[in-house]
Image (cartoon, grey):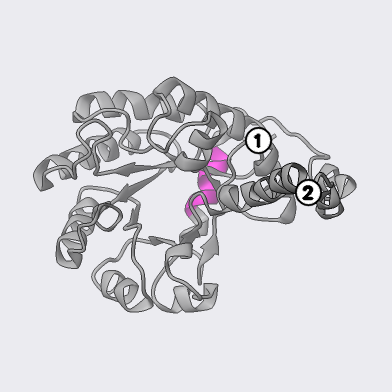
């Protein structure tokens, strides 16, 4: 059985290897085990995908629901799991540290923290945002395993197309101890190159927002970790929409010819190994 410590060590090692690696985003234990079965070396949760499973909008999941979700994913896989921990479910540094420590107890190998408030729907003031990252970094560095803290600069996702401020924030988060940096919303390889030229730490990139870019091109532009957010979840929902429309509009069931092969899916689920600390 893989311990949490071993998963964390494997996850940290992925960030030091040559090139970039894909970290796809499952939304439940079944999709996580399926992706693991294909051979992905690490997985990441998706806040919008998890919210979908509750029939809610992104940002409406509670702390307890998030913790249970991470526990389920970590317990049903043998690869490292990175948690999209949104803003840590708190604005102040002291509370966010408490929440992150609870999150670590679920067995995951890393998490990302946003600089956008779930409550006020605003980007945190610069110094406050840095203090939040620093508080978490100082807490996780005391662990006896290399838990990977990702600090996110959310400007671009919320209509603030200020690349200079985004880079300033990322550099500050790196300086106070973040292991990985992430500015979701970058829309071109040129923007990505501008960011990575200023940063030494590994950079995560949200691939679906850079249309047509390949893994090789993203790596050449400086990306180390490539995630896809909720894209897989929404891609999986689309066939349900088409099937529902066909049944209601035509009264037919031709959509069943496109069902996933049960045996192939089950083969991906053939081994379930619980991990422990």
Residue 24, percent from left and from top: 57, 53
| Mark-to-mark CA distance, 1 and 2 | 34 Å
Give the residue at mark 1: 29
Question: Nearest the camera: 186 or 275?
Answer: 186
Residue 125, percent from left and from top: 11, 44
Question: Quick check: 233 above or below 4?
Answer: below
Q: Is residue 11 magenta?
A: yes
Q: Which mark is residue 250?
A: 2
**Circle 1: element type:** helix
Residue 11, percent from left and from top: 52, 50
Q: Give the side of residue 194 with respect to residue 25, left or right.
A: left
Question: Quick check: 262 above or below 4?
Answer: below
Residue 226, percent from left and from top: 49, 61
Residue pushed farthest right?
263
Which badge, 1 or 2, comes first in the chain's sequence? Answer: 1
- Can residue 42 be seen in this snapshot? no
Give the magenta-colored segment's residue range: 5-12
Q: Residue at x 19, y 34 (%)?
A: 120
Question: Quick check: 74 above or below 238?
Answer: above
């Amino acid at each position: 059985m893989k311990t949490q410590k071993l998963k964390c060590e494997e996850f940290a090692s992925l960030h030091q290897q040559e090139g970039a690696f894909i970290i796809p985003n499952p939304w439940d234990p079944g999709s996580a085990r399926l992706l693991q079965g294909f051979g992905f070396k690490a997985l990441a949760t998706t806040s919008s995908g998890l919210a979908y499973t509750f029939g809610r909008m992104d940002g409406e999941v509670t702390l307890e629901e998030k913790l249970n979700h991470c526990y389920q994913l970590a317990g049903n896989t043998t690869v490292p799991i990175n948690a999209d921990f949104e803003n840590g479910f708190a604005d102040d540094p002291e509370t966010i540290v408490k929440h992150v420590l609870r999150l670590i107890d679920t067995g995951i190998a890393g998490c990302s923290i946003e600089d956008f408030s779930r409550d006020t729907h605003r980007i945190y003031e610069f110094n406050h945002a840095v203090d939040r990252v620093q508080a978490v970094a100082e807490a996780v560095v005391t662990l006896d395993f290399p838990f990977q803290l990702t600090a996110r600069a959310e400007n671009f996702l919320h209509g603030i197309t200020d690349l200079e401020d985004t880079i300033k924030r990322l550099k500050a988060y790196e300086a106070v101890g973040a292991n990985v940096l992430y500015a979701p919303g970058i829309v071109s390889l040129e923007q990505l190159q501008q960011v990575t030229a200023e940063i030494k730490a590994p950079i995560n990139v949200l691939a679906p927002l850079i249309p047509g870019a390949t893994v090789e091109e993203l790596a050449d532009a400086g990306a180390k970790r490539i995630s896809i957010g909720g894209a897989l979840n929404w891609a999986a929902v689309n066939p349900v929409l088409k099937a529902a429309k066909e049944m209601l509009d035509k009264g037919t069931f031709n959509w069943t010819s496109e069902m996933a092969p049960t045996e192939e899916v089950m083969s991906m689920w053939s081994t379930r190994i619980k991990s422990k600390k």
